[in-house]
Image: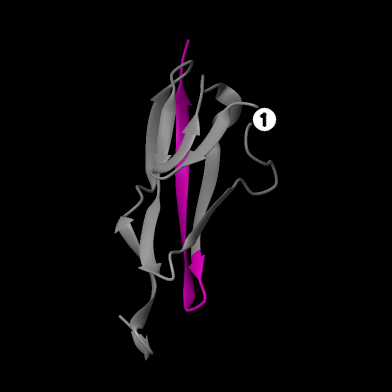
Amino acid sequence: MHVKSTNSFFLVPPQWKDTPTSFLQVEEGSDVTLKCSAIGTPTPIVQWMRPFIGLPTNRTTVNISGLFIKRVTKTDNGIFVCKAKNILGELTAAINVNVQGN
C-alpha cells in the first residue's frame, strides 16, 4: 500500500472494503445487490457501468454497499463493472451476472 502524508492526514489509494465477487447467479424476478465498496483517503468515488449496454433503466440504485437491481430479468445477463477512484488511484472489478429463470 502506498501512503502519502500531508499536513494532518494520510492519503491512501482505494482498497476494496470487501473484494467483489466475479460471478453471481440470480433468479429471474428477484432483487439483487452487486456488492462493491472501497475505502481510502480521500474517500473513493464508486461508479457502476455496463459496457456497451448501460445499466437497467428505472430498476437500479447505487447505495453504500453496491448496485441494487430490482426484479432482475434475462436482459440483465452479462458483465457489470464497478470502479472505485480517488486522486491516488483506481480499482476496477467486473461482476458476471447469470440470470436463471423459467
Instruction: Tell me if residue 26 comes above or below residue 23 in the rendering.
Output: above
As rendered, which of 77 and 86 lies closer to the eye? 86
User: Where residue 54 sits in the image (x, y, percent)?
Assistant: 67, 41
Query: Residue placed at 34% from the left, 60% from the top?
Result: 16
What amino acid is at disc 1? Thr
Which residue is labeled 1 in the image?
57
User: Where residue 69 sits in the image (x, y, percent)?
Assistant: 51, 29
Query: Residue placed at 42% from the left, 28% from the top?
Result: 32
Residue 97 among those drawn in magenta: yes
Query: Residue placed at 38% from the left, 37% from the top?
Result: 24
As rendered, which of 92 and 101 lies closer to the eye? 92
Magenta stretch: dominant secondary structure = strand
Left or right: where does residue 5 sit relative to residue 89? left
Instruction: Tell me if residue 102 comes above or below residue 57 in the rendering.
Output: above
Residue 64 among those drawn in magenta: no
User: Where residue 47 sits in the image (x, y, percent)?
Assistant: 55, 53
Give the residues drawn in magenta, as a range. 85-102
Query: Residue placed at 35% from the left, 89% from the top?
Result: 5
